[in-house]
Amino acid sequence: MTQDPYQTLGVSKTASQDDIRKAYRKLAKKLHPDLNPDDSASADQFKAVSAAYGIIGDEDKRKKFDAGEIDADGNERPEQTFYRDHAQGPNGARYYTSSGGFGGEEDLSDIFADLFGRGGARASAGGRNGSRGDGGTFHMRGQNARYALELDFMEAAKGGKKRLTLPHGETLDVTVPAGVRDGQTIRLKGKGGPGLGKGPAGDALIEISVRPHNLFTRTGDDIRLTLPISMDEAVLGAKIDVPTLSGTVKMNIPPAASSGQVLRLKGKGIARKGKAAGDQLVELKIILPKTIPDTVKSAMEAWRANNAFNPRAGWGEGKG
């Protein structure tokens, strides 16, 4: 019997969707088959965690599960009115309808099994694979499947192909668009559960999480970078190498540069399809050596004695 999905993910029934998502990500990272090769116990746990997230990680399915409309495997539960409507037919016949749809006495449990699926594949009363006992056919779209995919910062920024390992060991090749954001969902049409009858397959919904970068951060389609510069580069100006998403470029540091000053590299940010590329914003940060030479100290003392510059003049005197 499938465990309650809330218990599997270790969350309460009042947990927010964000809390459920965080719990799933934490467990998926810990149990993922790529990180636990030849560990069948972790693989089974990963399958269970992914299946649980497929139920309560989807708001619509979660509502149905909480209402008792589907079980922990995502299969629909039979409505109680079904039994009452058909338990007593004309002339006292059990499970009989005048249209002949059930063909006289039948085992109701078998009807339910065919209607709601042995293993989730059968679709209707008196038939299988979408076939109805009255000669008609059910056509129903397949269920969507939800998965999580973790990318490093550069993979998300540049896009490309990524192979996702599914809970049951299958793989799914995902085309990651350039500029995909953390928390964004990629929809793969027709890659979810199979449809019933001639119904189309559901979609695969791939939720993206992006690992942080050691240098870059993202604001919209702009990339931000804090660039350390030396005292002489700040005073005299310089032309230095600066890392970008597309490689290293030369950038001019103007003379008399200050910490916190932001320089812009046009078009060096995120480039998304159909959108103008963002910029790279470079914030300067002056870094002094741990040991200051005596010659520099003497020069600074002379400068202090002959200059009245005060960077804090008027500081904190704003109206408010």
Image: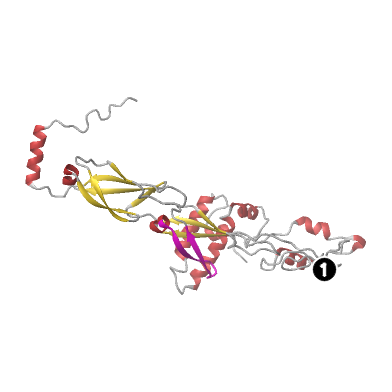
User: Looking at the picture, does residue 95 appear above or below residue 210?
Assistant: below
> Residue 214 appears at what percent x and percent y?
33, 55
In the rendered view, does 50 fall on the left or right side of 281?
Answer: right
Residue 97, magenta (yes or no): no
Residue at 70% from the left image edge and 66% from the top image edge: 117
Q: Quadrant of the N terminus?
A: bottom right
Question: How many numbered marks does the figure carry?
Answer: 1
| Residue 8, quarter of the rendered image | bottom right
Give the residue at mark 1.
Answer: 106
> Residue 177 appears at what percent x and percent y?
47, 56
Which is more toward the observer, 52 or 250? 250
Which is more toward the observer, 187 or 36? 187
User: Looking at the picture, does residue 21 appear above or below residue 168?
Assistant: above
For label 1, the SS is loop
The amino acid marked with disc number 1 is Glu
User: Looking at the picture, does residue 104 appear above or below residue 208?
Assistant: below
Magenta stretch in the rendered image: 158-176
